[in-house]
Amino acid sequence: MTRKDNSVARLYRLAQSARSGQWNLEHDIDWSRRPRLPFWMRRAQARKALSQLYHGEMATSDLCEALLADATEDRYEVRSCLGLQLQDERRHAAAYQRYLEALGGIDPLDDGLQRALTAARHGPFGNLGAMLAYHVVIEGELLRLHGVLAQFVPCPLLRDINRLVGHDEARHVAFGKIYLPEAVQALSDDERRALYAWLEGLWQDAADSALNRRRANLAIATFFRRWLGGGWTRHAKALDSLGLPSATGREQAA
C-alpha cells in the first residue's frame, strides 16, 4: 500500500469515527444546570475567554464551508471529513452560545485573534496556509484553552461541553495530521521556508496583542505569560511533524 493509499484509508476510518461520534446538543447536555464559576472569577472575565472559543468555532466552521465550496478539492474522503467537521463546529458554537447567554451574552472577538483569522483566510498561501494556521495555531490553542478551563473553572456544565467538544477537536487535529503532510510535501524548499515564517509571524502577532491588552491586570498578565511561554515551540514541533521544519530543524537535518 502506498503512502497515499494509506492516507485515504485512514481518512475513511476517521470519517466513520466522526459519523458514529456525533452528539446531540439537546439530549447529551443537561441544560437544567447553570454556570458555576469559582469565587475569584467574575462573569465578565469568563465571558471574555469563552467568547473567544465561540468565535473560533464559528471561524473554523466558515473555513470548512469555504473549503467544501472549492472545486479543486474533490476527493471524497477529504470532503467527507470536512463536511463532518463543519457539522461539529456549528454544534460547538451553538453549545458555547447557549452557555454564554447564561453568563450575559457573547463578547466581541479579540482584535488579535481577528487579525490572525483574517490573515489565515486571505494570506498568500491559499487554502493550505489557512488550514495550517487553523489546524496548528488556532485549534491547537483552543485545545489548550479547553484544558486550562477544565482546571481552573470547575463548572459541571462547562466541563461536559468541553469534554464533548474536545473529543471532536481531537478528530479534527487527526485529520490535519493525515491530510496536510501530503500538501506540504508538494511545496518547494523556498515555499516551505516562507510558509513557516508566515505562520510564526501570524501567531506571534496574536500572542503579543493578547498579552498587551492584559498588562493592566498583573494576575491575568502573569497567567498569559505562562500560557504563551513555550507556545511557539509546541507549534513548531507540530509543524515539523507535518513536514514543515523551522530553520534550526532544517540545519540539523542537513
Image: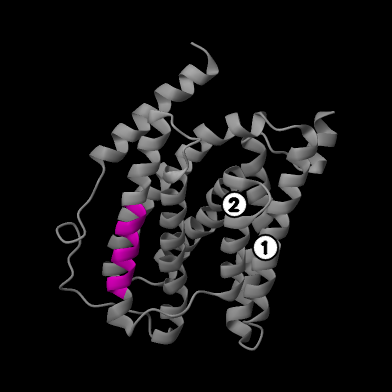
- Pointer 2: residues within 10 angstroms few (<14), some, or many (20+)? many
Which one is nearer the viewer's eye here, 90 or 158?
A: 90
Q: Is residue 11 left or right of residue 2?
A: left
* Residue 182 tag number: none
N-terminal of the pair, mark 1 or mark 2, is: 2
Q: Position of residue 129 (x, y in %)?
A: 62, 47
Q: Position of residue 59 (x, y in %)?
A: 46, 60
Q: Position of residue 99 (x, y in %)?
A: 29, 73
**In which quadrant will I find the C terminus?**
top right
Q: Is residue 113 left or right of residue 169?
A: right
Residue appearing at x 39%, y 72% in the figure:
153
Residue appearing at x 61%, y 43% in the figure:
238
Which one is nearer the viewer's eye here, 131 or 227?
A: 131
- Per the image, the residue denoted by label 2 is 133
- Per the image, the residue denoted by label 1 is 229
Q: Main secondary structure of the magenta part?
A: helix
- Identified by mark 2, the residue type is Ala
Secondary structure at badge 1 equals loop
Which one is nearer the viewer's eye here, 98 or 211?
A: 98
- Range shown magenta: 88-99
Residue appearing at x 42%, y 60% in the figure:
57
Q: Quadrant of residue 251?
A: top right
Above or below, comparing residue 80 to residue 24 in the picture: above
Counting the numbered discs, the total is 2
- Identified by mark 1, the residue type is Gly
Above or below, comparing residue 104 to residue 146 in the picture: below
Which residue is outermost to the top? Answer: 1
| CA distance for labels 1 and 2 | 19 Å
Mark 1 vs mark 2, foreground winner is 2
